[in-house]
Image: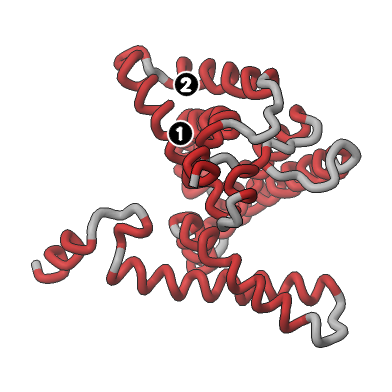
Amino acid sequence: MLYVLYASYVSIDKSDSLTLLWFLPVLFSCTVLYLMFRCMLRERFSLWMKLALALVCFAGAYFLPKLELGYPMGLNVAVTAFGFLLLGNVCFPLLRRCEARIVSLRRAAGAALTGTVMLLSGGVGFVCAHYNSAYVKRLLMADARYGHYGLFLAGAIVGLVFVSAAVLFLRALPLKRAGSLLSYLGRNSFAVYVLHKPVVMIMRSVFRKFAVPAPVEVTVTCLIAVAASCLVSILLERYAPVLLGRGTAVKAERGSKA
């Protein structure tokens, strides 16, 4: 019980609990940090202040010493996550402006521009991951195993750029359903993350009985896991939206009656 209450990745693992839930205490700590700084700074909590604070968080997380049992409530990981949260706050208005400009362009020009950004960011991300593999065998943010911290941050940021460019690329093409699918996955990423693990474990046990190439196994498992997670999230959104962080089931029921 004490290990669970300590709520670090290592302590959760020692308590024989689901290590998949490491993000819950981290998310809690991250939310507390955001509300604390928002209340302290108030009107001064501008985009520039958020950007400066994000850089401070990234630098501070790098210099935090490693503890054998990890930090309570995953605080060391929460500092890094808080930096990404602030960075997302800063970039969101910029992405909205980019979206408006892409939509105003011709489809071919918009697709060419966003496609180029996808290729560049994807290439940079691949290079970061390739060189970072020399520093860490298994990158695991839950346990603050980043490898080379600079390469980790660069890879994470260009990954966000790649996904954003992919959504804009699909919107620039006459493939509205594909763009809507990515947007849907983005809105339900929390549910997909929580629900995919049991599906992956089942598929892994199934594929062990057959001689299937690893790329095929990974591809099929990912597709089935995402599809199953989305189906469950649809049911949760209808009957228990509170589990997805979207109000309460009572409010949803009242809204449907109205």
Q: Amino acid at mark 2?
A: Lys
SS label for mark 2: helix
Residue 158: image x %, image y %?
68, 39
The quadrant where residue 253 appears? bottom left
Q: Which residue is mark 1?
A: 29
Which of the two residues, 204 or 175, is positioned nearer the viewer here?
Answer: 204
With respect to residue 11, does 201 lie above or below? Answer: below
Q: Between 98 and 189, which is closer to the camera in this rendering?
A: 189
Which quarter of the rendered picture does the C terminus lie within?
Answer: bottom left
Query: In percent of the image, x 44 and y 73: which residue is there?
Result: 232
Residue 130 horizontal/vertical position (percent):
87, 44
Crowd rating for badge 2 (residues with CA inside 10 Å; few <14, some 14–19, many 20+): many
Q: Residue furthest left?
A: 258
**Residue 24 falls left or right of residue 166:** left
Name the residue nearer the viewer: 14 or 181. Answer: 14
Q: Is residue 233 left or right of residue 23?
A: left
The dot on residue 50 is 2
Answer with mark 2 or mark 1, whichever residue precedes in sequence.
Answer: 1
